[in-house]
Image: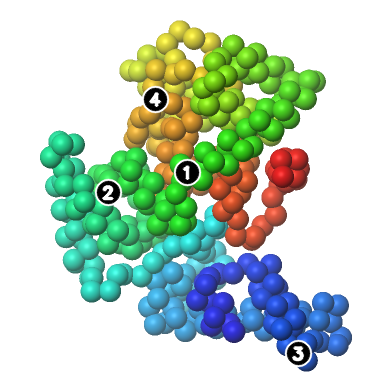
Amino acid sequence: MGEEIFKLKAYPSSTQIGKAAKALVEKHPCLKENNSDTGWEGWKNSLRHKIGNQRKKLAKAGIRDVAVNSGKRSRTNPEGAAPRANIKRPKRGEVNFLPSCPSGETRESLEKRRVEMIEEFRKTSAERDIPLIHQHMMRTFSLRREEIITSSLPVSELKDRWPALFNETQLYCEFHRITNLHLPHVFYAALDEYAPRLIGLYKKKKTGRVGENMDQLLLEYEQQDKNDICTTRTAALAGLPIYLKEDSSGIFKTCKDEMEFHEAALALVADVGEEDVPAGVPFSPRQVFVVLEDQVVMTHYRWTDALVCLFGLIYALHLSYPVKCSSFFEFIQVVLLKLDDERKQLRPKLQTLKNELV
């Protein structure tokens, strides 16, 4: 049974192992433990050890998603990292975290495909062989994930090596390869469902600084065209950091000139001309820049679309959520996209918001 669980997930959470143990006892009542509160706690511990042993065997066999965590400190390697330090495993609902090399391919053949893609991107948009790029991106997925996860290359270097990742279409394809979700479709379907309820919750915030900031946002929202779905989407997303009492000023920025430069590890910078923008989120920007490690990597004409691209890049480049705005991105991950591996509980304020929406 441990082997079957491993086929589904190399690093299942304690909750998921518990569910498997419970299902085992329910399927075979004769296995129920008499001196256990649950009747399956011992089976849960047994499965945990079985899965751990399976990981060790497959790591020795060179299976990439577990071999990447081998070589830790041991009697034969006393100078290695602590066994539980910096474990590289899916933590945000990824389905294909670190895949193995495709059948019939070698590192050399994949590298050749990567170089061919770079040559294609040196051509004009009209001259590029889009089907070839798409095929090469699919085949080189394992090589790309290995570089991104194990090497932690700077964004500038990744952009040089994998320019297709910063193309909107290929970015969405990459997100689909990682999570099996079509990012914009799932994101906007969920956002359109929750947006009216979110705005309803925002209107109840009347006191303190949160209430003042929310009033400014809602006043601006009331002046917009309500027939434009993007207006409601923008208001719902812009109010989230305020509602969750997070400081989004370092992430959602504005500029009055497209030549104005903003230094940021991760940000959306909207070109708004001379407008005053509440919460740093404009309803009608001239354009929005996606900034990673102090450089513009993508641009868009709608703030919500730029946010979708930013979220896709966080997954594709294996970036961490900004500390000061982490609940905002966790809301997108867990509530909108339902990418929850059940490994940790939501923060109380985020769990409360989720309960109010469901």
Q: Which residue corresponds to the image point at 47% horizontal and 84% vertical from the top-left?
A: 57
Q: Looking at the image, is mark 4 or mark 1 nearer the viewer?
A: 1
Q: Secondary structure at mark 3?
A: helix
Seen from the viewer's position, the closer of residues 283 and 258 is 283
Proximity of marks 3 and 1: CB atoms separated by less than 8 Å: no
Q: Earlier in the sequence, mark 3 or mark 4?
A: 3
Label drawn at residue 185: 1
The percent coordinates of residue 152 (x first, y second) are 39, 53
Q: Secondary structure at mark 4?
A: loop
Give the amino acid at mark 4.
Answer: Tyr
Label drawn at residue 272: none
Seen from the viewer's position, the closer of residues 222 and 297 is 222
The CA distance from mark 3 to mark 2 is 52 Å
Give the amino acid at mark 3.
Answer: Leu
* Location of mark 4 (residue): 301
Give the amino acid at mark 1.
Answer: His
Give the amino acid at mark 2.
Answer: Trp
Q: Secondary structure at mark 2?
A: loop
The CA distance from mark 4 to mark 1 is 18 Å
The percent coordinates of residue 6 (x first, y second) are 53, 76
The CA distance from mark 3 to mark 4 is 60 Å
